[in-house]
Amino acid sequence: MEITTRTVLEETINENLYTIILSNPRDKESGSKSKVRPIMLGGSLLYQESETKGSQIFHKNYTKEEAVKVLEEKMMSHYKQMEISTRTENAFILVSKKGKITIKRKKITQDKSIDLSHNKEKHYILEENKPIPCLVDLGIQTEDGKIKASKYDKFKQINRYLEFVEDILPHLPKEKTLKILDFGCGKSYLTFALYYYLKIVKEYNIEIIGLDLKEKVIENCNLLAEKYGYEKLRFLVGDIGKYEGQDEVDMVVTLHACDTATDYALYKAICWNAKVIFSVPCCQHEVNKQIENEALAPILKYGYLKERISALLTDGIRANLLEEAGYKVQVMEFIDMEHTPKNLLIRAVKTEKGNSTGIEHLTEFFHLDTTLQKLLSERNL
């Protein structure tokens, strides 16, 4: 009998399976890696796929027949390598550039336990049960490091943010003092966590400045930074658009800067030639006031739809302008710290000289002239 991908899958997907890992994609945009493991759900043995696409992981559960069909199709159309581990064998399936399939199987005996639990413990960048002074004072952890039930979402969200930061660390030099500016830092949950992660955990030499308009908030943040011994973390009262305290900055963070404050923060980052930019915009009113388009008039007459379209256009324009300034830009989903609706995260990494994106055709189409466009135009950036 001919050994095929399907026959291998049919023989290995059972109660003895540890994992199946699909990797080496032909097109990373459609998924970079997929892992399958058995789980017990509702008294039935199922197979859970966890597929990584960009910065997100998507989960699906299959019966054996469904898993065989899905994995076979993915090996035919997307992945070039499959590794199967069971109690009794290891199998490897490789697909060459010309489509030739090579299958290697090796009989073995393994006696490690198989975890059939549905929800595996999540390993966070900031570990649970390990007290972090700033998270204790901010009310997220107890003194022995346990996460307060009412603050668990915040703990997960902080870790999610640090995962985004972790991805860009190769773009930040470790041999020099990194200068980081956090515009609109507020109570600074993320600012303190960022300092702890980069300085204490990763041992980067850093200097972070948090900027906000609320004097009382800034005063409290400075007291906490002093209490923790965070000598290179300080907070200032100031306006994003008027801040002139630096000539060069490595990373700019602007989370929930309202309306055009985001534009001023992005403009400052571009002028400083910042290597990395994190921006979560909110309250995009400027485009909402300007947008005009005859073709879309039947939709724009509805206030809620006009607001949604304006917000997407605003962030799309910003992303393209960053590309033109020489940044590789990703627009991703980010969860707000205060449990408001999900927002977009614009993550930009400086690469090389930018190229025209043709964004001016879109802005002309909708009769728009945004603050970031005007600021960059005035500086010929």
Image: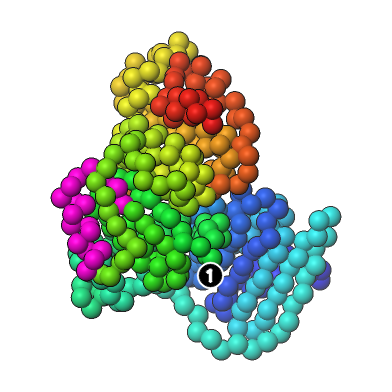
Task: Kindly identify the amino acid type of the residue bearing the numbered disc 1.
Answer: Arg
Quarter of the image for the N terminus: give it: bottom right
**As drawn, 50 above or below 309:** below
Which of the image's four quarters has the C terminus? top right
Query: Does residue 87 appear to the left or right of 210 in the view shown?
Result: right
* Residue nearest the observer in this picture, 208 or 278: 208
| Residue in the foreground of this view, choosing between 336 and 74 | 336
Which residue sits furthest left?
216
Q: Which residue does the image show at 41% across and 54% down from the upper left? A: 180
Q: Position of residue 374 (x, y in %)?
A: 45, 24
Residue 118 on the magenta span: no
Label 1 residue SS: strand
Return the residue nearer the eye: 41 or 309: 309
Displayed quadrant of residue 297 = top left
Residue 228 in sight from this viewpoint: yes
- Residue 343 sits in quarter: top left
The residue depicted at 72 percent of the width and 72 percent of the height is 92
Please tell me which residue lies in front, 294 or 377.
377
Q: Position of residue 265 (x, y in %)?
A: 39, 39
Query: Farthest residue toward the top?
Result: 294
Q: Is residue 131 above or below residue 187?
A: below
Instruction: Give the magenta range.
Output: 210-227
Mark 1: give few (<14), some (14-19) or many (20+) Cα within 10 Å: many
Count of picture labels: 1
- Residue shown at 24%/66% (left/top)? 226
Residue hosting label 1:
37
Which secondary structure type mostly characterizes the magenta part of the structure?
helix
Q: Residue at x 65, y 62 (%)?
A: 23
Q: Position of residue 300 (x, y in %)?
A: 37, 18
